[in-house]
């Protein structure tokens, strides 16, 4: 299952849209921001908890369901947050490097 997920991310990353929705300059999130996000927060609530809008990392459409993964850079070098949205709500979140 993990290999399938990694392969899907690699494929999605290779076809990901340009980063047109960059977060505001200086927007660096913390582990505390990440902890505030609850599933299934609506997208505006996620942005409030995170302190800014994320960068669109991956978008896909399956049937009539759009899935978007947004990414935030952390304050610590190499730290990152991914939050997955469907139907305007957060359905999963992950972090690394904090």
Image (cartoon, rainbow, N blue to C red):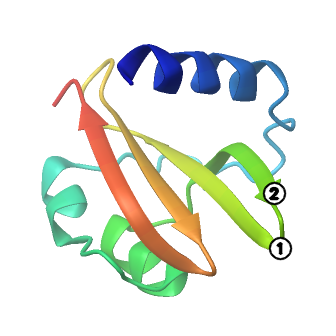
Secondary structure of the residue carrying tag 1 is loop
Quarter that holds the C terminus: top left
The residue that mark 1 highlights is 64
Q: Is residue 18 above or below residue 52?
A: above
Q: Is residue 46 above or below residue 82?
A: below
Q: Which mark is residue 61?
A: 2
Displayed quadrant of residue 40:
bottom left
Residue 46 shown left or right of residue 33 in the figure = right
Residue 38 shown left or right of residue 25 in the figure = left
- Residue that appears at 74% across and 66% down: 66
Question: How far apart are labels 1 and 2 at the CA level?
Answer: 7 Å
Density class for disc 2 (Cα within 10 Å; few <14, some 14-19, many ≥20) is: few
Q: Is residue 6 above or below residue 76?
A: above
In front of the other: 92 or 18 = 92
In front of the other: 53 or 9 = 9
Residue 33 shown left or right of residue 27 in the figure = left
Displayed quadrant of residue 15:
top right
Q: Is residue 49 above or below residue 33?
A: below
- Residue that appears at 60% across and 81% down: 88
User: x, y percentage for residue 80?
Assistant: 36, 33
Check whether the beta carbons of the residues at disc 1 and disc 2 lie within 8 A of each other.
Answer: yes
Residue 52 shown left or right of residue 21 in the figure = left
- Residue that appears at 33% across and 53% down: 93
Residue 75 shows up from this direction: no
User: x, y percentage for residue 20?
Assistant: 84, 47
User: x, y percentage for residue 29?
Assistant: 32, 50
Secondary structure of the residue carrying tag 2 is strand
- Residue that appears at 22% across and 49% down: 30
User: x, y percentage for residue 92?
Assistant: 37, 58
Quarter that holds the N terminus: top left
Density class for disc 1 (Cα within 10 Å; few <14, some 14-19, many ≥20) is: few
């Amino acid at each position: 299952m993990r290999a399938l997920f990694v392969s899907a991310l690699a494929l999605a990353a290779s076809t990901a849209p340009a980063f047109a929705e960059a977060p505001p300059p200086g927007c660096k999130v913390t582990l505390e921001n990440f902890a505030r996000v609850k599933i299934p927060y609506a997208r505006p609530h996620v942005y409030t908890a995170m302190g800014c809008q994320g960068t669109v990392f991956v978008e896909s459409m399956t049937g009539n369901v759009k899935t978007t993964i947004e990414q935030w850079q952390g304050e610590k070098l190499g730290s990152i947050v991914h939050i997955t949205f469907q139907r305007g709500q957060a359905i999963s979140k992950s972090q690394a490097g904090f």
